[in-house]
Image (cartoon, helix red, strand yellow):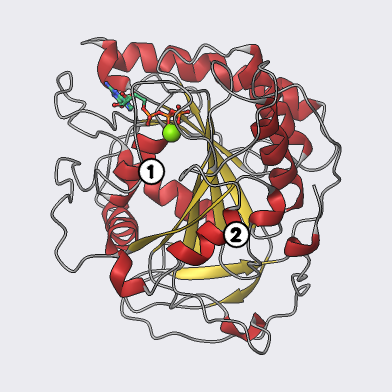
Amino acid sequence: MSGALKYRSGFGLSRLCTKSRICGYSPRKTCWGQLSPASLHNSAGLKQPWKLLVLRTSPYSTLVPKTKPSEDKSVHRLSSICYKPGSQTPAPVTKEDKPSLNAADKFFRQRYAFLYSASELKNHPINVIIPEIVILGRSNVGKSTFINALLGRSDAAKVSKKAGHTSTMNVFGIGSPEFINKDLLEKGMRPPRHGLRLLDTPGYGFRSHTDWGDTIIKYLNKRKSLRGAVLLYNREGDAHDADRNVLKALAEANCKTLVVLTKADTLGPSWVEKLSQSAESIRPELRKLSALQENGWKEGTGWVSDIYAISAGTRSSPKGLGAGGGIPGVRRAIMDMAGYNLQEKTGVKPENIPYDGDIVSFDDIKWKS
Ligand SMILES: Nc1nc2c(ncn2[C@@H]2O[C@H](COP(=O)(O)OP(=O)(O)OP(=O)(O)O)[C@@H](O)[C@H]2O)c(=O)[nH]1
Ligand SMILES: [Mg+2]
């Protein structure tokens, strides 16, 4: 990721504003289920997502209560379950890790707002400056639960035992916008209210719809503010054809990819070995895929070689895992993918360095699907 602009923060964050991604678009219809296309509705059951957007982007203060009754305090603040290549045990959290884990923790918990639901690419409002991270995975793998855990809450995204619950792309704004380069805002544009956007998506596979997949594939290829994808695998890490198709789509779109194994708590006392086996089985697939790409989607640059694990949806976990285990490490990895530099020393005042990269175009809203 080439950085042209750098801000320094007051509490240990800085953001690298990157040049826009350029990627080809080839429509595919192989992902997101085999069910017959249904007429798409947004999460409130309305057929006009734009109206929903207007209704739900009410002033920020009404979206985030001052008291946080549902704040989930079960996640240990600085835990991380990260399997580095060749290692059979998770990398220990060291003293040096703590400031960056802490900074990511603050950023994610600081503020959030539900912004809008979109069932088609053209329903996504223009966003030229706030980095976006999309969460992908099979139906029921735990995407919505994962978003709640990242935010340190239990009620932001709707969770269900029933597969296929999330049926639109639901977008959350999080963190402070203080490191975003506001120079890129055109006259009349609203200043950013968040530092990052997270997108919950409908799952693929069981009870999914082809239309959902088409929309997401278009989003991966066209959205210039997209900085990366978190691909959730179930705990066994067993890749289905649907997972492979999505990985291929990410590779072809040259979208930076972070793999996270979910539901680690269900693995029992030998979770360390089982997760290690999963990580070791996923990496060769990623390597095989990146060998076929000529667009730069390689280990390290195209996909993150560290594989993370989490147990997001439960308070009781096997020994050593901890309730909500691993979430803080993933928060930091997401911020890294989004272009934030968490290694900066704290207490440094913001500093502007002129942007010399491409100006991100304004065209998101004009695309027709
Ligand atoms: N034990 C355990 N259960 C989890 C975990 N994460 C999610 N779940 C459960 O898995 C089920 C599905 O979770 P969701 O977050 O709704 O899954 P999803 O991927 O958003 O599902 P769709 O929106 O249908 O694609 C729910 O019953 C969650 O409580 C986890 O880490 N551990
Ligand atoms: Mg969901």
The x, y position of residue 178, in whole percent, is: 43, 78
Residue closer to the observer: 134 or 209: 209
Q: Specify whether tag 1 is near ligand 1 (CB below 8 Å).
A: yes
Kind of element beneath mark 1 = helix
Please name the amino acid that badge 2 sits on.
Answer: Trp
Residue under circle 1? 147
- Looking at the image, residue 332 sits to the left or right of residue 80; the answer is right
Q: Quadrant of ligand 2?
A: top left
Q: Quadrant of the N terminus?
A: bottom right
Q: Which one is earlier in the sequence, the residue at label 2 or at label 1?
A: 2
Residue under circle 2? 50
Distance between mark 2 and mark 1 Cα atoms:
23 Å
The x, y position of residue 282, in whole percent, is: 56, 19
Look at 31% across and 51% down and name the residue there: 151
Figure check: 107 above or below 264: below
Look at 18% across and 69% down and name the residue there: 66
State yes or no: discs 2 and 1 in contact (Cβ < 8 Å): no
Kind of element beneath mark 2 = helix
Disc 2 crowd, CA 10 A, few/some/many (<14, 14-19, 20+): some
- Looking at the image, residue 298 sits to the left or right of residue 267; the answer is right
Q: Does residue 339 appear anywhere in the picture?
A: no
Figure check: 329 above or below 189: above
| Residue 173 position by quadrant | bottom left
- Looking at the image, residue 283 sits to the left or right of residue 101; the answer is right
